[in-house]
Image (cartoon, coloured by chain):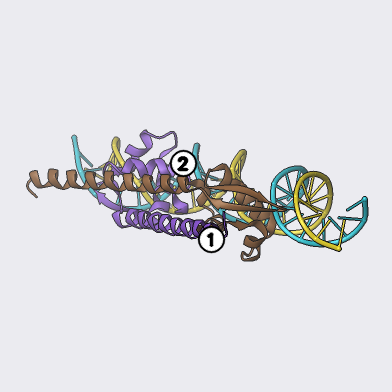
Chain colours: A brown, B purple, C yellow, D cyan
Amino acid sequence: MAALADPTRRAIFERLRAGPRAVGELASELPVSRPAVSQHLRVLKEAGLVSERRNGTRRLYRIEPDAVAALRAYFDEFWSQALEAFKAAAESEERSSE
Amino acid sequence: MAALADPTRRAIFERLRAGPRAVGELASELPVSRPAVSQHLRVLKEAGLVSERRNGTRRLYRIEPDAVAALRAYFDEFWSQALEAFKAAAESEERSSE
DNA sequence: ACTTACCGTAAGTGGATACTTACGGAATCG
DNA sequence: CGATTCCGTAAGTATCCACTTACGGTAAGT
């Protein structure tokens, strides 16, 4: 999740949501240089958020579905646990006459 | 989301999941000083992830449910959009005889 | 009022990091 | 082969950021 902290990296990640893209293609749409995009993609790849496939001289990056599923599960779990705590707190307050 | 990048801050956020906590209480369970926890809580508060309530000399921090819901919605949306792109790509590959 | 408990803020510092330019490697085309 | 395209890596730099110590401020207890 730390990999998604940087705004530029999040922008890259969100663009890959629509389908696989090449490095230069992404760089042309962003206000940073191509090597910067390369470095961001490496971070995303090491975090398991994207994967790479070589196609001629180009390298297509795509989103790793399992990673998105894991993040989704994390916040789902977080949500239900927080909700449970809220309910418990509300009930205990109710018992203490308030 | 950038607020959840730091591991210490994520640890604080996850501990608040079980219910409201005071600053010193959180600091005693973490390998950082109390002011560090204070600063992290300020970041989380400015990000809208937690809220504060004064209780005597102590300040209780609690999770802001709307923020968690927003994050959950973000990844849900991300997931469905990525899935849609996958389906579209699979169909177009299928049409191109493969 | 004085002390104690609890906390936020200021200032300073070491380390991480996002970016640039420069360079070299791999695949395609003539 | 030579030229071109596309890309990763190295090196250097400026900025950001997480942390500590020191200090001040507010609320409760004696």
- Residue at the spot 54% in from the left edge and 43% down from the top edge: A47
The 10 Å Cα crowd at callout 2, few under 14, some 14 to 19, many 20 or more, is: few
Q: Earlier in the sequence, mark 1 or mark 2?
A: 2
Left or right: A85 as drawn, with respect to A3: left
The percent position of residue D8, horizontal first and vertical second, equals 69, 47
Residue D13 horizontal side relative to residue A77, left or right: right
Could you tell me which secondary element the residue under label 1 belongs to? helix
Numbered label attached to residue A24: none
Q: Amino acid at mark 1?
A: Arg
Q: Position of residue B46 (x, y in %)?
A: 40, 57
B73 and B85: which one is in front?
B85
* Residue B15 makes an appearance in the image: yes
Q: Which chain letter matches label 1? A: B
Query: Would you name the residue on which mark 1 appears?
Result: B95
Question: Who's the residue at 40% across and 52% down the image?
Answer: B44
The reply to whether label 1 and label 2 mark residues of one chain is yes
Q: Are marks 1 and 2 in contact (CB under 8 Å)?
A: no
Badge 1 density bin: few <14, some 14–19, many ≥20, Cα 10 Å: few
- Whether residue A96 is visible: no
Q: Is residue A52 left or right of residue B2?
A: right
The tag on residue B7 is: 2
User: Element type at marker 2?
Assistant: helix
Query: x, y (%) of residue A19?
Result: 54, 58
Which residue is at a point 35% across and 42% down the rendered structure image? B14
- Quarter assignment of residue A32: bottom right
**Total of numbered circles in the picture?**
2
What residue is rendered at 61% in x and 48% in y? A52
Q: Nearer the viewer, mark 1 or mark 2?
A: 1
